[in-house]
Amino acid sequence: MKRIFLLLLALMVFPALIFAGGKQEVAKEEGPKEVKIVIRAKGNPTEHWKVDAFDEAVKLLNEELQAEGDNRTVVIEKIFDDASWADVVRSFAMSADAGEAPDIILGGHEHIAVYSTAGYIIPLADSVSEIKKMYPEFDDVIDNLWASCMLHGKVWGVPQDIEARPLYYSIPKLKALGWSNAKIKALPERIKKGEFTLDDMIATAKEAVAKGVVEPGHGYWHRPKRGPDFYQYYFSYGGYFYDPDENKLVIVEDALEKWYAFQRKIVDEGITPENFIGTDWRIWHDTVSHGKALFWNGGSWQWGEWAGIYLKDQGGQEYLFENVGYALQPSGVRGKSGGTLSHPTVYMVTTEKASGRKGRDLAVRLLAKVTTKELNTKHAVESTHIGILKSQANYPPYNKDRFLSDVIYMLDYNYFLPNHVMFSTWEDAVWEGMQAAEIGQRSPQDSTAATIKLLQAELGDALIVK
């Protein structure tokens, strides 16, 4: 029995020993093991670095693994399209439920709440300080951006880009109204100090229409479709989204009514067209980029679209700098600083169950390798998104870009959407109320009352009414 036991033990300890022709040979050591990591992101053609940056990042990671003696080799698959956010979320959820999701998914930071609650993504660290210790590259991320990646005290994502949503204005149109170069140049600072408000913008736009400087309905154009840009007006009148201490969503009744009144007033004053919501994006881009409106609200990323697509034959950025100015979103309260809503997109890592693959540690390490000034600047410059890294402020390929250098100060006046699992319900209700107010279906007062009633019914104890 003792001899049988020793024989079995030998077979377990030395499974690689084989016998052939009277000789003992050791099997060859297992070669490199491929680990596949699939990355999915959405974006327009100028935003291709959201996935293409991984081509260089995976080389850096594999070099590091080889130097460590790790026999794994990472290969990547990239999925990039320009589907709507709703379609991206829907298809991602379906693929995660089927165990076929990408390993890395790019989304709005507010998706963290939904994806984590559904069990689709993993927390990357228990704190910001921990993830910085684990991966030194992350210490370069602008500190306040980590707030957008947090939920229940844990880090669930890594910032990929961020933007501002400036108020743009036509320099030639302001000159036609009699504004001097000095007055035009001073406008961003006046908005920052709260000296030029939304009421001043309306009055200026109304004057431009009255004097024939712009056509009726072209004094001010907001975005033509649903989106978070509209919440800037809610903030401009003192509104906010979220109470972190209570972990509850917030609606500020007075700010909501003033926001809804603003949306109706721009139509009543003749500076925004009737039934403007739903205007085709191509019409919107063509109109504002060619200076046919006096004021408009847009994203910093759209500067690159205008230069590279709509104004390509007119000089691109050179034309824009000569004809278009930009500033923070004006406040609705005199003396209150202007601001901007920033919407970081973040990389999230899916669970093994959601993707059907192992290698979570390598997916996070790959995100560290893509979070460098060299790679992020390629995306920032080409797509006119603001850099996410501290080092980019002094990095020549970034700071030589005039527009990005001009608008980076706006991150000192920004705020984020909340990472709350019920925020989409909040959005649906306030959008419905805003649209009803702007098109005149209901008065701002009635829309406010209806919106709050709907929010209370659908959110219950998850909502605080101020």
Image (cartoon, helix red, strand yellow):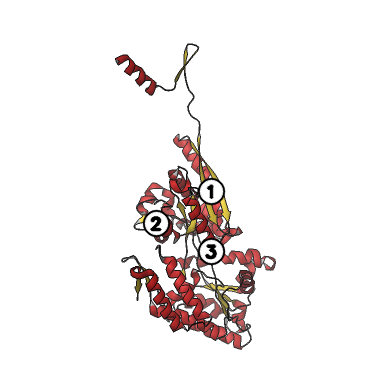
Residue occupying image coordinates x 61% and y 58%: 45
Distance of mark 2 from mark 1, alpha carbons? 28 Å
**What residue is disc 2 on?**
117
Q: In this orientation, which residue lies closer to the viewer: 7 or 279?
A: 7
Q: Position of residue 432 (x, y in %)?
A: 48, 74
Q: Earlier in the sequence, mark 3 or mark 1?
A: 1
* Amino acid type assigned to the residue bearing label 2 in the image: Thr
Distance of mark 3 from mark 1, alpha carbons? 23 Å
Q: Secondary structure at mark 3?
A: helix
Q: In this orientation, which residue lies closer to the viewer: 443 or 307?
A: 443
Q: Earlier in the sequence, mark 2 or mark 1?
A: 1
Residue occupying image coordinates x 46% and y 49%: 354
Q: Badge 1: few (under 14), some or many (20 or more) residues near its Cα, within 10 Å?
A: many
Q: Secondary structure at mark 2?
A: helix
Q: Secondary structure at mark 1?
A: helix
Q: Earlier in the sequence, mark 2 or mark 3?
A: 2
Q: Which mark is residue 404?
A: 3
Q: Badge 2: few (under 14), some or many (20 or more) residues near its Cα, within 10 Å?
A: few
> Residue 242 falls in which quadrant of the image?
bottom left
